[in-house]
Image (cartoon, helix red, strand yellow):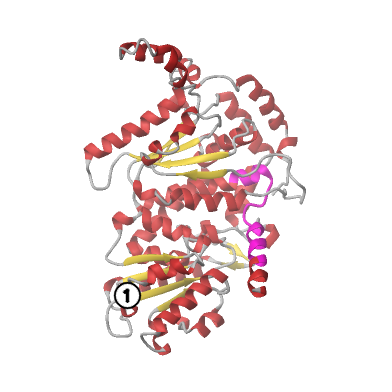
Amino acid sequence: MKNINPTKTNAWKQLSTHYEEVKDIHLKSLFRNDSNRKNKFTINFNSFEFDFSKNRITEETVNYLLKLVDEVDLKSAINAYFSGEKINQTENRAVLHTALRNQLDSEIIVDDKNIMPEIKEALNKMSSFSDSIISGKWKGYSGKVITDIVNIGIGGSDLGPDMVVESLKYYKNHLNIHFVSNIDGDHVQEVLKNLNPETTLFIIVSKTFTTQETLTNATTIKKWFLQSTSKNNIAKHFVAVSTNLTMAGEFGIASKNIFPMWNWVGGRFSLWSTVGLSISLAVGFENFNKLLIGAFEMDEHFKNTPFEKNAPIIASLIGIWYTNFFNAETEVILPYTQYLTKFAPYLQQAIMESNGKSVDRNGEQVNYQTGNIIWGSTGTNAQHAFMQLLHQGTKLIPADFIGFKQSLYGDKEHHKKLMANFFAQTQALAEGKTKQEVHLDLKTQGNIDGINQLLPFKVFDGNKPSTSILIKKLTPQTLGSLIAFYEHKIFVQGIIWNIFSYDQFGVELGKELAQKIYKKN
């Protein structure tokens, strides 16, 4: 990859000049002057519609942004990303979460070895194991079938699987899935208090089998388990996802029940791997595989589609436009489905841990904004919480609205009201409400005496940007595509900002100090 400071490119200079020319243009004016604006700024992909039209951009803006990715040589970076080159240079690793969902027969070489056979072998192992648990063939130490699954992990070993299991709750089978992550002892005890050791399976997810939070929780759970039975039965109730066969074995886990991990997969992108075992158990391996297929379809779109019609690339560029030229510092994620209640917290780690960097790929301090603060909630809950800030606050906060054309249970009246709110919010943010419109409303309501007093408080400036992602239906496949969309957005922005997106040294310092403080006490 070329290590280019984006601010030194010709495109950046052109964007800076262009920003001064268009920064005050209102979205209403852009729509008024171009009746075909929505079509021009909409990308259709499978059952997705990505509508970028309510962003403060023009065709000229997009052209300059596309010049920027040409100047930083995004095309060769994408090739390196998918081919297995060690683009995570600070850790000397490839970045190949895309290989985990690869549906092609082509080889992917890492360190002179084709990794696809071992990926397929791991998936087959997940499939067989999931079937044995779900079907009841696998029995606990007392001969009873497994009813509860507890995933013990933290960070990417928790947030991704937890988010997907919650998102696909509609497709869930009879198994009860629980997640233990926080080292807070109250957390693990709250989970354990309603579990039966005879019918519970624990999955310890730790690449090195040394992560403090995970091993502390696993040890506490093991002690709780051994109050009911002997060490000989650990193998029937504990499995691991790890590379450390020795330590997992010492814990009591049978070697055949240790699922592999690979160092070319970052934790926050690992749900596609054996880290997603809890997903496979919750919804069945067939649905887990559909998740992989959906992600692969987005990978192919990203890899092969011309940049001007490439949804992750256009989304990335618009994010650069707001972050580096409008000086926006946050982005809000607004899924209009309660199933995606954990989507924003998942993206917080994926995005902020990846692109929260202040040193570029040349080892120099950056003098421009990188990364974004990611937050959000589900609609319509958000409308009764923080949307006031977006509508009438002083901050520019680009918003992603994620909606579905069909509900899962088919309640058309509820869904009609839900989507009316979806469309109304994006329209209100874009258009606002003028003094004249407020004046007419108050006059119509008969509030003649209070018009002058209330007028300034009821005006909405509008011109607040949003992107609408409209999807036919929430399925394992469309969820896979949606997650992969944001993964590729992370990658593109990291390339433009000239940073290494796939290390996370910022996570380590606090952990090191915590160990020292713990030992002192």
The amino acid at mark 1 is: Ser
The residue indicated by pointer 1 is 132
Query: Judging from the image, what secondary structure is the residue with disc 1 in?
Result: helix
Q: Position of residue 242 (x, y in %)?
A: 52, 73
Q: Is residue 125 visible?
A: yes
Left or right of 83, for residue 240? left
10 Å crowding of disc 1: few (<14), some (14-19), many (20+): some
User: Between 225 and 200, which is closer to the camera in this rendering?
Assistant: 225
Q: Which residues are magenta?
A: 492-513
* 223 vs 507: above or below: below
Q: Position of residue 104 (x, y in %)?
A: 47, 57
Left or right of 388, for residue 112? right
Q: Is residue 52 visible?
A: no
Q: Position of residue 1 (x, y in %)?
A: 69, 49
User: Between 109 and 356, which is closer to the camera in this rendering?
Assistant: 356
Q: Is residue 183 magenta?
A: no
* 63 vs 72: above or below: above
The number of numbered badges drawn on the structure is: 1
Q: Main secondary structure of the magenta part?
A: helix
Q: Position of residue 317 (x, y in %)?
A: 58, 36
Q: Residue at x 69, y 31 (%)?
A: 11
